[in-house]
Structure formats: structure tokens, C-alpha cells
Image (cartoon, helix red, strand yellow):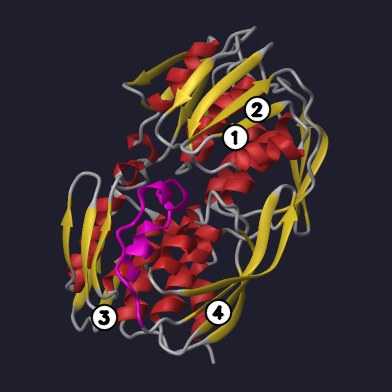
Amino acid sequence: MSNKIIIEKPISPFDKNLEIDGDKSLSIRWALLASQAKGRSTATNLLMSEDILSTLNCLKKLGTKITFRKNKCEIIGLGLNGYDYKKNIQLNAGNSGTLGRLILGLLIHSQKKIKIIGDKSLSKRDFLRVTKPLEKFGAVFESNKGKLPIIIRGIKNPKPIKFYENKGSAQCKSAVMLAALNTEGETIIKAKKSRDHSELLFKYLKLPIKILKKKKFDIIKIKGKKEIHSLNYKIPADVSSSAFFIALTALTKKSKLTIKNVNINPSRIGIIKILKMMGVKINFKNIKIYKGERIADILVESSTKLKNINCPSDLNSSAIDEFLVIFLIAAKAKGISYFKGLSELNQKESPRLKWGSKILRLMGIKTITTKDSIKIYGNPKLKVDKKILIRDFLKDHRVFMASVIAALSFGGKWTIHDKNSIKTSFPSFLRIISNLQRK
């Protein structure tokens, strides 16, 4: 079967209701914490992507019992430090940076060597940002200059640490938080603002965590050795996955869309704030709090007058996975849009800042790019009427999906390779696209 997709015409106007797959960040965090909890935890609407399957497979290798009953996943937790596994096991994180980095935090107490591997893309990514603070707890690592494969050997009595997380990386912060659960005493993290799913889950589970919120960073204090209670969770829809359809609706004339039961955690909705500044019509409905997370239906309409933006960099961390589609909105806005402080984009599955610029230039949009910024010269009348080929992007699922949205929004004949890349995060993406195209 072909692993590419060809799109030859824009999508027709639509007015639809959608239900999106479960949030990837929450799906992985639920599974990791459930494996360390005492007793049975269950989840419905768990995202069944390759990243989550990699998570469950790693936990099974560590001795965790996992079963599926209809649409429900059950994990029988082994308790804190309860993993039971053979010597010299190998855990494959696949394409998942969240899994690869966070699971190291749960392994700092493990005194048998464990090898972490990943796919070609993940093996190019930086793990020093995680291994350096985890070494302070007493864990020992062997690696190729901070890249996978990594061998970890934990320590019997990890010591609490003080750590300054200055990159705005939720993965790094969460890995240290998970490690702190295994220590006697209090770990203190000064963290640049980033996603706070881990903090909210810790609070909901009544783990001993204190958070002092400052303007640009948070002080997080965690006391370890507290039993984790089981967690039954209906995973809300993923706002990062929803972003592709929000952008498609905004760029498609006479279209409306309602996306049901989406996680609108304030640390994740930078894209909503940015697109509203640019003139996109977005509203929340049926807002509620669930397990500490803010959930709502998202209503979006097509936008006829899109405005350029000098994007505030303090929104970067809360929109880091959505910038490729934000760039597409900027391509049709009137004037020059400027985005800065985006070096973290090039630390993802592919160098996304470079790919965002490349896609726009292939469409005929002028860009000026540095190592951490991009200027986009928007064209409200943009229509693509040529052939465009997208390939060799390290199978980055977000590059693939953003390219599909661009093709459906602006026209042209697009050949986009590696459609199987969506299996890592959003396997139903193309099926949902097909549903939008049906009358």
C-alpha cells in the first residue's frame, strides 16, 4: 500500500461536529502514574497511537499488567518502586520524546541496568536536558553524547535535589517530578512556564506537591515516598490534534466546526490566543473542570479578514506543537507576521522551524528565517496552482498533517509522503478529513 497521499483540490465548505482522539500528553502520563499506583486504574478514550502503544509495551516489560476490555484500558499498578523485571532489559520509546524522557524519571531507583532506545528521529534528539538533572538524584547514565541509546542504572536511595529548568520543557520538568516521587525529602524545581499536566495530576492524586506561581516561572516542591492512588480517567480530546481542524476551518470559506470535549488547559491554548489575535473566530462552550483539567467544546468559523501578528514570545511554550498551522494562518494574513524565540521547534521530531518555512516558500510565501525566528509575508489572496512535493521530513507527523491542511486550504497538486507518520500521535487524522469532505 502506498505511503503517500495526493491532494489535487481544496476542501469544500463544511459545517460539522467532531470528536477528536484522546490527549497524547495525558494518555502517556496516566499510564506512567497508573503503573506506579497501588491497584487498578482505568482509562477510556485513551489515545491508541504508536506513542501510547510504545508506553504500554515498555510498562509491560517492567512487569506491569495491562489489559483492554472493550474501549477501556486497565493497568494493575505495582506501587512506588514496584517494577519487577529481568536484568539488562531494553525499552523501545519509538518516536515518543515524552515517553523516552519521562520514563527515565521513574527508573532512578532501579538498580539493574536498563537500555532505552528509539526510532531514527528520536535518536537525534537531546536527552542531556533530562539525564543531567537525574544524575543529581544519583542515577548513572551511559549514552552517545546525550543521544539514544541510553543506559540507566538507578540508585537504591535517591536524594532530593534543587533544579532550575530554564528551557520551558514540560518533558524535562515532568521527568524530574516523577523522579522526586522516589526520594526521601523534598525536591525543589524552579521551572520556566510550560505545560502543567503533571502538576494537575499530582494535585488530583493528592500527592504532596506545592506550587508557587511567578510571572515567568513556577516554584514546584515535591515530597517523595507517598503512595499513589489509582486513577480512573476519561481522557479528554487533544487540543494539539484539534489545532489542525481549527486552522482548516479558519482558512475555508463559509465553514463552521464544533470540536467536542477538548482539553483547554491554559498551558496548552497558546494557539487559541494567537489565532484570536489574528482574527480567527473561536469560542468555548460547556466549560467544566475534570480531574483538575479544563474541558470545553471549541466552536470555530471561517475567517475572512486575518491579521498579521508580532507574536508574544511568552505564548511560545503553550503553542509549541501548533506553530506549523499558525504559520499557515499567517500565510493568508494581511501584512508581515513575526515569531521569535522558537529554537525549541528545531528540537522536535524534525527541525520544524525550517520545515514551516520550507512549506510556506513552496507555496509562494516569502519568509525570512533565523535559528530561532521567522518573518512571514502574508498574502490574503494566496492560491496555489502548482505541484508541491513534501518528503524526507524524518517522518514527523506534524509536518505531514500541516502539509495536508495547507493543500486542502490553498489548492495546488500536493504529493505528501510518509502518511504512516500519523500513527505516532493521531491515527484517525485522515479518516476525520474524509468525514469533513462528505456532504
**Disc 1, disc 2: CB below 8 Å?**
yes
Residue in the picture at 22% in, 64% down: 376
Residue in the picture at 34% in, 41% down: 347
| Amino acid type at image mark 4 | Leu
Residue 276 x/y as whole percent: 45, 68
Q: List the residue tagged with mark 4.
A: 257
| Amino acid type at image mark 3 | Pro
Q: List the residue tagged with mark 2.
A: 62
Q: List the residue tagged with mark 1.
A: 58
Region in magenta: 305-329
Residue in the picture at 41% in, 16% down: 142
Please tell me whether mark 4 or mark 3 is closer to you in this view.
Answer: 3
Give the distance between the C-alpha atoms of the residues marked 4 and 3, in whole angstroms.
22 Å
Please tell me whether mark 2 or mark 4 is closer to you in this view.
Answer: 4
Quadrant of the rendering where the C terminus is positioned: bottom right
- Is residue 366 located in the magenta-colored stretch of the structure? no
**Disc 2, disc 3: CB below 8 Å?**
no
Residue 436 x/y as whole percent: 52, 82
Q: Earlier in the sequence, mark 4 or mark 3?
A: 4
Give neighbour class at mark 1: few <14, some 14-19, many 20+ (Cα, 10 Å): many
Which quarter of the figure has residue 111?
top right
Disc 2 secondary structure class: loop
Q: Earlier in the sequence, mark 2 or mark 3?
A: 2
Up the image or down, 168 lies above or below 25; here it is above
